[in-house]
Image (cartoon, helix red, strand yellow):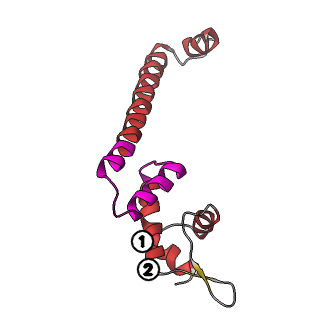
Amino acid sequence: MNIGDVAKRTGLPAKTIRYYEEIGLIRPLRDTNGYRVFREADFHKLAFLGRARALGFSIEDCRTLMALYEDEDRASADVKRLAKKHLDQIEEKIAQLQSMQTTLTHLVQECAGDNRPDCPILKDLASG
């Protein structure tokens, strides 16, 4: 497969695929003309990476997950530990977003939104 074919099949942009190659996450073969030649295993790795990134894993986490994926002697506890750490980070972000939502909801409700200059939103932002 060429890069266009694998991009179509994985849903990843060719630029992303080239980046993953540049940072060593995948290593497609090169044809005599220098073009990348993707094997079925490359396709599966790219699909794996695409799914991991869609779940919000960092590039370094993806590198670790890929190494675990390729290691037949891996312990599933290692995979679970990494996924649990990521889940904890997601839950923390959700809590932060919910706090922001609560604050902004209150401020928007308190603002008259009329022609007067008084605005509790601006007062809150200015108060730090």
The structure residue drawn at horizontal position 30% and vertical position 52%, both measured from the top left corner, is: 76
Residue 40 is labelled as: 2
Q: Label 1 sits on what residue type?
A: His
Residue 44 is labelled as: 1
Work out how far the residue at label 1 is from the one at label 2, CA to CA, in angstroms.
Answer: 6 Å
Q: Label 2 sits on what residue type?
A: Glu
- Label 1–label 2 contact, CB within 8 A: yes
**Side of 15 where 1 appears, left or right:** left
Q: How dense is the environment of label 2, judged by Cα within 10 Å: few (below 14), some, or many (20 and up)?
A: few
Q: Is residue 1 above or below residue 104?
A: below
Q: Is residue 115 above or below residue 73?
A: above
Q: Is residue 84 above or below residue 48?
A: above
Label 2, secondary structure: give it: helix
The structure residue drawn at horizontal position 37% and vertical position 33%, both measured from the top left corner, is: 91
Label 1, secondary structure: give it: helix
19 and 105: which one is in front? 19
Highlighted range, magenta: 54-82
The residue at the far left in this view is 76
The structure residue drawn at horizontal position 48% and vertical position 74%, both measured from the top left corner, is: 42
